Amino acid sequence: MPVTTPRPAPGPLAARLRVLAALLLALLPALALAAPAGAQTDAEQRPTARQMAQQAEIPDPLRVGTEGVYAPFSIKSGDEFTGFDVEVMDAVAERLGVEVEYVPTKWDSMFAALESDRFDVVANQVTYNEERAQLYDLSEPYVETAGVLVVAEDNPKGIESLEDLRDERSAQNVTSSWAEVAEEYGAKVVGVEGMTEAMASLREGRVDALVNDKLAVRNYIATNPDPGVKIVAETDEKSESVFAAKKGSGYMPAIDKALAEMEQDGTTQRIYDTYFSAENTAPSWWELVQENAWPMLKAAVTVNIPLAALSFALGLVLALVAAVGRMSTAAVPRAIARVYISAIRGTPLLVQLFIIFYAMPQLGIRFDPFPAAVIALSLNVGGYAAEVIRSAVESIPRGQWEAARTIGMSRATTMRRIILPQAARTAVPPLSNTLVSLIKDTSLTSVILVTDLFRVAQFAAAPTYQFLPMYTMAALYFWVICLVVSFFQDRAEERLSRYVAR
């Protein structure tokens, strides 16, 4: 029988090693799970744009202010907005998980509208500068470009460089960064509404040059059949386009994250190539007229005519009250009426529109565009028509008042049944003129975001810069409306003069 040698009993060190090995084996699954969790820590600490948007409580829909007439960056076609800035904002909103509601706004009104909470963000080639950064929340740049110096094709002043701008007339939008560049080189800045008006002024010789965005100018030259201008120099300064929001909005970190994601996956470059690498072809003026005749007519019927009718009716009520107050023997109503009439007649309608729409929200009084337009136009009509009614009433012989008094009529009854019917015949022609002026003045309401007939014409012409056919058609529509008003004015005058002795 073989001899079996017994195994020695384990010592204290061996026992401890075995316990440690068992513990390590037990901890291996936990370490395996912990390793990926640690690897994911950095990713978890970097939230997506959508998560950041939820934390910042970005509104849904996100209201975005843009011109709609600044090709190729912001273009309104029918009810849709397109353009480089618009598509970039659409892609940003998709990553934020919100819808976008575009608010067409003229550039000169853009930041006033932003301050009065008409929209949340501006997407309209806003150039970064330190002054804006102090006043507004600005995003990281989403496109970089430069400015170019543009002159007429024949270049009568021989301007070849930015230094040649000294003491020359340069057409600029006075609130743009390019106006500052022109001023730095000693140019005499001539204020215009936008680049299209600047180009027209340059071609017609009213100015000598202009400085504007290189991409916008190239698009203008490419899409205009006869641009009549040329680029002669480029600025050293680079322009960085950003989105803007009210100071302290908290929106920009999420928007910046979305822009970074778009830059990383190539979305921004694809949008850029769509607008700045492809050839553009412009439709003929006749095709443009055919395409936009109905939208312009629809705007006239649904916006301008109702706006004028409602404002005129309310304005006549205000005018009658003011006229009665103006003729009152009591000092207080007479003073109130005089101040109201003087204030309305002594200030421009455009300023009145701005005060009601952009300034009143600072006092906590806010109106939507159409009601704000009705209020401003009604107040304006009331101020002018009050003097028309007063003069018509005072033209009635005093004997009419005395005759009514002898048969026991009160002053109010005399006014209603005797004086006003006779004064109406005298008041109809000037009141009709007031109505005609009101119809034309409705075109001013586009500055407070009302999409009227004239604004639709601007939207239609902006992508191709063919403003002559669009503006001519807008003028034709206004003319036809005023002809109809004049027809009814003539009929009313004939009817009121039927029993008047000749």
Image (tube, grey):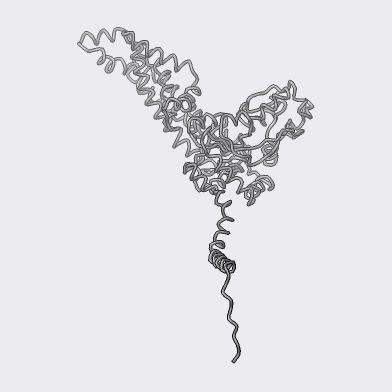
Question: Horizontal placement of 242 versus 96: left or right?
Answer: right
Q: Nearer the viewer, residue 158 or 236?
A: 236
- Residue 423: x and y, percent? 34, 16
- Quarter of the image for residue 472 reads top right
* Residue 220 shows up from this direction: yes
Which residue is at a point 73% across and 31% down the rendered structure image? 149
Which residue is at a point 39% across and 23% down the rendered structure image? 315
* Residue 458 shows up from this direction: no
Kindly give the residue lying farthest to the bottom in the view shown: 1
Kindly give the residue lying farthest to the left in the view shown: 408
- Residue 311: x and y, percent? 41, 27
- Residue 302: x and y, percent? 44, 37
- Residue 39: x and y, percent? 59, 56
Q: Is residue 44 above or below residue 123?
A: below
Q: Nearer the viewer, residue 138 or 85?
A: 138
Q: Nearer the viewer, residue 221 or 63?
A: 63
Q: Is residue 203 above or below residue 5?
A: above
Q: Nearer the viewer, residue 377 or 492?
A: 377
Question: Horizontal placement of 435 versus 207: left or right?
Answer: left
